Amino acid sequence: MNEPSNHIAQALTGKCLCGAVSITMRDAHSEVDVCHCTMCQAWTGSMYAGIEADDFTIEGEEHITAYQSSNWAERAFCSKCGSHLWYKFLPTGNRTFLAGMFDLPKGVPIKQQIFVDEKPDWFDLAQKTPMKTGPEIIAEAEAAGFSFD
């Protein structure tokens, strides 16, 4: 019996607002991660919703500016239109791409919401998902061997 896949079978291509940068994900994860940390709020204006893919290609790299927002994270944007492109966790190199750049299939759920202790009162998400505080996420990462010093 086949188990349900936790990846999206078809390739997904997303573009920044002006089209100078395009990202094609193959075998993208089939869930969206949401972050409510204050850095993501400052970066996006509310929350960050990202989707991960282990296999991707990027076109228009000459238009990408990456900003190291902390000693563990990099955030990238299009230098022409300012569209946000990805969050990269530096200790592992894993990237999540802004979910809104892609035409995702219907029914893609939220995997989890993190840094919920920093979420502003003015918005809430209706889906029932694991809710983790910033200290819980940092403890999980430290338990996996990552240092935030």
Image: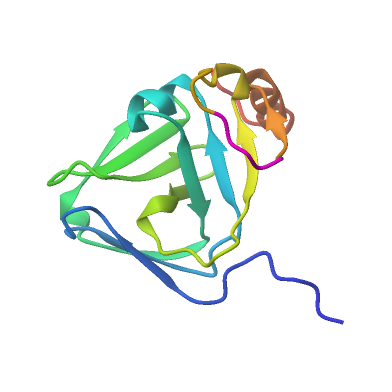
The residue at the point 39 percent across, 52 percent down is 100
Check the picture and name the quadrant holding the N terminus: bottom right
Q: Is residue 93 magenta?
A: no
Q: Residue furthest right?
A: 1
Task: Work out whether 37 lies above or below 129.
Answer: above
User: Residue 46 at what x, y percent from top left?
Assistant: 41, 29
Task: Work out whether 111 lies above or below 20.
Answer: above
* 61 sits left or right of 5 in the view: left
| Front in this rendered view, residue 46 or 138 | 46
| First to last magenta residue range | 124-128
Task: Work out whether 26 lies above or below 43.
Answer: below
The residue at the point 48 percent across, 43 percent down is 49
Task: Work out whether 90 lies above or below 25.
Answer: above
User: Residue 57 at what x, y percent from top left?
Assistant: 36, 66
Q: How is the image coloured?
A: rainbow
Magenta stretch, main secondary structure, is loop
User: Residue 5 at what x, y percent from top left?
Assistant: 70, 70
The residue at the point 50 percent across, 24 percent down is 37
Name the quadrant containing residue 116: top right
The residue at the point 42 percent across, 23 percent down is 39
Name the quadrant containing residue 77: top left
* 78 sits left or right of 110 in the view: left
Q: Is residue 87 visible?
A: yes
Q: Is residue 94 visible?
A: no
User: Residue 92 at what x, y percent from top left?
Assistant: 54, 43
